[in-house]
């Protein structure tokens, strides 16, 4: 089943985000290589594809996991979580409707 991982960044966490980014991307690439990643990306803090020093407000990931528990465990082990980038993480089941 698909799950949505919605993470909100802690204030002032841009430097931590940048430091943990390579390890974070490696985990996402592993999901992609396994054919389980639907989409992933950051949420710019301002209305710009490159927010510069404004940084990011969070991240959104939609991926396939065997259960809600597995999705939560995966999210808890994210390098951004360990680095203190995320202030809050929400994991919920996701039903993809479009595109079909």
Image (cartoon, rainbow, N blue to C red):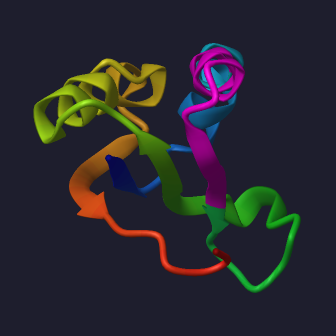
Q: Position of residue 62 (x, y in %)?
A: 49, 52
Horizontal side, residue 82 vs residue 9: left or right:
left
73 to 3, vertically: above or below: above
Residue at coordinates 40% horizontally, 24% vertically from top-left? 78
Residue at coordinates 60% horizontally, 81% vertically from top-left? 98
Horizontal side, residue 68 vs residue 82: left or right:
left
Horizontal side, residue 60 vs residue 11: left or right:
right
Residue at coordinates 62% horizontally, 49% vertically from top-left? 40
Quadrant location of residue 16?
A: top right
Residue at coordinates 45% horizontally, 29% vertically from top-left? 80
Q: Position of residue 28 (x, y in %)?
A: 61, 27
Give 56 or 15, whichever is nearer the viewer: 56
Please say whether residue 39 is one of the residues in the magenta stretch: yes
Specify the farthest residue to the bottom: 47
49 to 62, vertically: above or below: below
Q: Give the extent of the magenta segment.
A: 26-42
Specify the farthest residue to the left: 69
Numbered circles on residues, count: 0
Give 16 or 36, whichever is nearer the viewer: 36
Q: Position of residue 83 (x, y in %)?
A: 41, 22
Q: Position of residue 47 (x, y in %)?
A: 76, 86
12 to 51, vertically: above or below: above
Please say whether residue 41 is one of the residues in the magenta stretch: yes
Horizontal side, residue 5 vs residue 92: left or right:
right
Q: Is residue 35 visible?
A: yes
Q: Is residue 10 visible?
A: no
Quadrant location of residue 29?
A: top right
* Quadrant (top left, top right, bottom left, bottom right) of the C terminus: bottom right
């Amino acid at each position: 089943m698909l799950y949505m991982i919605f993470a909100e960044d802690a204030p002032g966490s841009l430097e931590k985000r940048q430091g943990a980014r390579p390890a974070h991307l490696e985990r996402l690439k592993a999901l992609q290589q396994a054919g389980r990643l639907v989409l992933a990306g950051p949420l710019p803090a301002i209305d710009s594809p490159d927010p510069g020093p404004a940084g990011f407000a969070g991240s959104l990931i939609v991926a396939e996991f065997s259960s809600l528990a597995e999705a939560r465990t995966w999210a808890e082990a994210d390098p951004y979580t360990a680095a203190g980038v995320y202030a809050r993480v929400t994991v919920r089941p996701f039903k993809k409707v479009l595109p079909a």
